[in-house]
Image: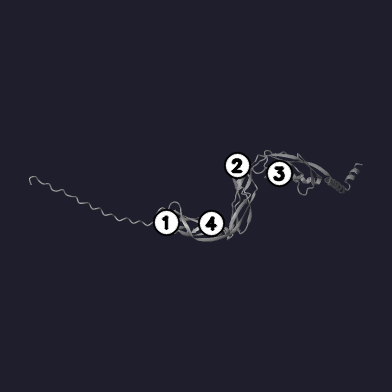
Amino acid sequence: MAGSVGQLFVRNWPIKLAAVFFAVMLYVAVAAQQPVTQTLMLRLEIVGPPGRPIKQQPGDVAVLISGRGGELLKLRSLPRVIGKVLPDTFSGSVWHWRLQPSDVPIPKGVDVLVADITPRDIEVRLDSAARKEVRVVSHVTVQADSGFLIQGLAVLPSTVQLLGPAKSVAAIDSVATAVATIASVNGPFFHTVPIDTAPLGPVRVLPREVRVSGEVTPLLQRSFTGVVVTTAASGFAGFTLATERVVVEVSGPEKRVQALTRDSLRVVAHVVGRGQDAYAHLTVAAPGGIAARAVPDSVPLKAPAARPLPPAKAPAAKPPVAKPPPKRRPGA
């Protein structure tokens, strides 16, 4: 009887082993399709704005995930960290964050559902921040095309907001744009330039870009002849100008240059040097926005002619001195 039972198990054993194998595989396949829930503990990592560290990182959160067993097996590559970077614009000391299912980093291609997150509301405390408004210094060079002149250059906004640690913010009085060049300008222009944040350290600036704009006007050049040279208040004692009238060349916006007259210009001579090496340097005072120069820009000086000495007077003749009569001797 025992032998017949043993033969029963041994008989056709390859077929029976294969049947067991396929039965197990069928069970696993069916089990993998059944909905399953799994709880994962994930760590929160919060990154504060530059220069504002987080006082204390929040604890772990429990994430309840549901899905087919086969999909849950794919979560072995799930990062066990939920990261969050606070925006640069945040200036408060307490930041509130309500976790959403989309915050859980589920790998692509994994068909699971984030059913719950505990705790969902997170409170993060940061070091306090200071604010300050400072002016913007432009490091933009504008090169007008030939025959044009830059007019009305503006930076908008002209001030920006600083945000960061109080000590760092207090040490900054102004910010500068990045170095840039706008070449061959022959009409109205605008250019967006970033703020140079390299020297600011942990301090953030808002906005991070400014707009440089302006206009150009046609450039006109004119010459005025016979402009009288006036002398400065001091330094001309004993000297006169060798040339009292010069040519003045002006350039500037077309409308302003056309409105100029000879009386609009004033040429002033200043003594340079001493003695025989002295000469007069000429400067031109012109209305605002007008560039002017004298031609020539210096003139020699003349020393006054020496006055002739008066003729020497002949010494006056002395009147003759009368001699006293000779004394007579007694008895003569």
Horizontal side of 320 relative to 50 (left or right) equals left
Point out which mark residue 240 bears.
1
Q: Earlier in the sequence, mark 1 or mark 2?
A: 2
Task: Kindly indicate whether the residue at mark 1 contacts the one at mark 4 (C-beta within 8 angstroms).
Answer: no
User: Which residue is tagged 2?
Assistant: 170
Task: Kindly indicate whether the residue at mark 4 contacts the one at mark 3 (C-beta within 8 angstroms).
Answer: no
Q: Nearer the viewer, residue 203 or 306?
A: 306
Instruction: Provide the secondary structure element on which disc 1 rests.
Output: strand
Amino acid type at image mark 1 = Thr
Q: Earlier in the sequence, mark 3 or mark 2?
A: 3
Give coordinates of residue 268: x percent, y percent. Answer: 47, 55
Which-is-in-front pick, marks 3 and 2?
Answer: 2
Which of the image's four quarters has the N terminus? top right
| Label 1 to label 2: alpha-carbon separation | 58 Å
| Label 3 to label 4: alpha-carbon separation | 58 Å
Horizontal side of 78 relative to 169 (left or right) equals right
| Label 3 to label 2: alpha-carbon separation | 29 Å
Instruction: Provide the secondary structure element on which disc 3 rests.
Output: strand
Point out which mark residue 84 bears.
3
User: Which residue is tagged 4?
Assistant: 291
Residue 314 appears in which quarter of the rendering? bottom left
